[in-house]
Image (cartoon, rainbow, N blue to C red):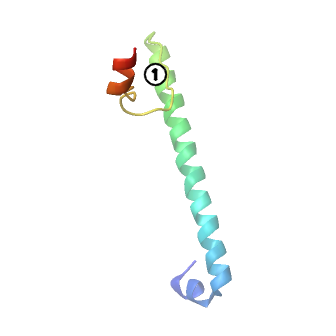
């Protein structure tokens, strides 16, 4: 696809192409992620290490207690 062909598209067609492209990017990103996870697990199993990838990032959220709840309890 060239810039000229993009410029020739109607607004509706251009919007649809954008939606399709965004969906394709998401699909490719997810596929790469799954391939990386599979590679990590395969390498880990070769050396006898167990790996669990839960899909969350960062620290777990801390549960905050309010002063009213502490005083009432």
Judge by depth and name the residue closer to the eye, 26 or 45.
26
> Could you say where residue 59 lies in the image, as x and y percent from the top left?
36, 29
> Could you say where residue 44 lies in the image, as x and y percent from the top left?
45, 18
Report the side of 14 relative to 71 (left or right): right
In the depicted structure, whether residue 61 falls above or below residue 51? below
Residue at 57% across, 62% down: 22
Report the side of 71 relative to 15 (left or right): left
> Could you say where residue 4 lies in the image, as x and y percent from the top left?
55, 88
Q: Is residue 53 visible?
A: yes
Q: Is residue 65 visible?
A: no
Residue under numbered circle 1: 43
Q: Secondary structure at mark 1?
A: helix
Judge by depth and name the residue closer to the eye, 4 or 73.
73
Point out the image quarter for the N terminus. bottom right
Residue at 44% across, 12% down: 49
Quadrant in the rendering for residue 30: top right
**How many circles with numbers are drawn on the protein?**
1
Residue at 67% across, 82% down: 12
Judge by depth and name the residue closer to the eye, 21 or 46.
21
- Most distant residue in the top direction: 48
Residue at 47% across, 18% down: 51
């Amino acid at each position: 696809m060239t810039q000229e062909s993009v410029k020739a598209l109607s607004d509706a067609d251009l919007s649809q192409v954008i939606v399709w492209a965004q969906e394709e990017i998401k699909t490719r990103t997810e596929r790469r992620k799954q391939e990386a996870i599979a590679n990590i697990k395969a390498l880990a199993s070769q050396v006898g290490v167990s790996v669990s990838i839960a899909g969350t990032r960062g620290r777990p959220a801390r549960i905050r207690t309010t002063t009213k709840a502490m005083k009432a309890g």
